[in-house]
Image (cartoon, rainbow, N blue to C red):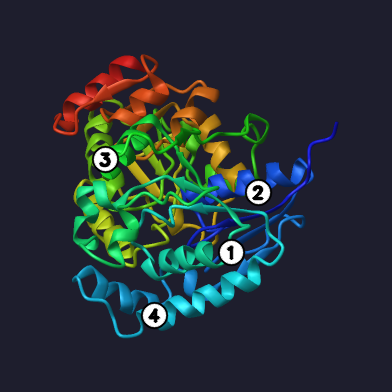
Amino acid sequence: MASPKHSIALLHFATPPVVGGVESVMGHHARLFADAGHTVRVLGGRGDTVDPRVPFVAIPHADSQHPEVLAAKQALDQGIVPPNFETLTATILASLNQALAGVDFLFAHNVLTMAKNVMLTAAVRLLLENNKSLRLIAWHHDIAATASRYQHEVHSGYPWNLLSAPWKDPGIVHVAVSEQRRKELLDLWNDSQVDVRVIASGVDPDRLHKYEEYTRQFSEQFALASANPLVLLPVRITRRKNLELALRITAALSALLPGATLVVTGPPGAHNASNRDYLEQLRTLRRELALEPPTGGINATDYPRGVAHFLSEFSQNYLPDPVVADFYQAADVLLMTSNDEGFGIPLIEAGLAKLPIFCSDIPPFHEIAGKHAQYFSLDDDPEAIAARIAQTL
């Protein structure tokens, strides 16, 4: 008997081709649902149609970076409900009602637990109260109420309590991307009876192994084949990725292996305007550590001592998954220096690419890699970490 077909919508602040772990998971889910014969659409403030079977439906005020949303968030972060909170919520709710006409299942990614757009959270709350037939799958990647870096964004009372209380409506399914996130949710809710499924994020190996034109051009310009070692850090540029440590490790590694090259594939994170300031700070540190790539490219016969590349400096476009996959094939080692993660997709990709993994000693990385990675404390000296990498390679 054939499985029933459904109408499915996936919701986040942004959708592919915007770069991010959540956006990547959404893109893969949408494609797989379409492959299975379901009717699929993706909803967000920013994005585009990247698969002709999966239309993008723009909800402008769902964007974490919409000017009105940013202004409201500034007040909310200070514990003040802005005067236009209800108006913005109603605007989003109206858009959701229109976009979700005929939809059976709504997959809401990070909307119930992150304070990037509390008006969107409130709108989804009202949506459920007014639409009893809609099934909600709440997909939890990150949790503002349990992360120290987000504590200033969460206060007591409405609407912040929407981010810290369990939603128990009939028909809601809660999903955490790791056992660590599931435990954090249950501890936050102080209710072990809430059903939270753990569904890890995934990677499609068939899409991982190929070289694209961009990769070939970049490799030729900067002689990546001569990099020794090529250290891959495939993340967005956000503070929790702790990229300062990655730069210092690369500088120390270049003293042991002069061809050491770091490649950071992602652009500044899409949901925090301060990430561009962070990139400038990283550029300053790169210059201080003498890791700047030469202007115009690198001659393979005269490879410099230590280089760090931010691919966002060489392409203003979002790099598609096949280009990032190319760098896994070219790299010698995966380096992940994050302070905190909900999951950690690059560890799976590194495993498929047979790369040695060096990563920070945090629970999700242990959950994914177990004994198949080398862990370092975030307090370890960069020179000591570099020595371990050199010895392993």
Three-letter amino acid code of the residue under disc 1: Asn
**Residue 350 against residue 78 in the figure, above or below:** above
The answer to which of marks 4 and 1 sits earlier in the sequence is 4
**Residue 219 against residue 123 in the figure, above or below:** above
Label 3–label 2 contact, CB within 8 A: no
Three-letter amino acid code of the residue under disc 3: Asn
Nearer the camera: disc 3 or disc 4: 3
**Residue 278 on image: x %, y %:** 27, 59
Label 2–label 4 contact, CB within 8 A: no
| Residue found at x 64% / y 69% | 99
Three-letter amino acid code of the residue under disc 4: Glu
Where is mark 4, residue-wise?
86
Disc number placed over residue 131 in the picture, else none: 1
Where is mark 2, residue-wise?
30
13 left or right of 98? left
Q: Is residue 293 visible?
A: yes
Nearer the camera: disc 2 or disc 4: 4
Label 1–label 3 contact, CB within 8 A: no
The answer to which of marks 3 and 2 sits earlier in the sequence is 2
Asked which secondary structure carries label 1, the reply is: loop
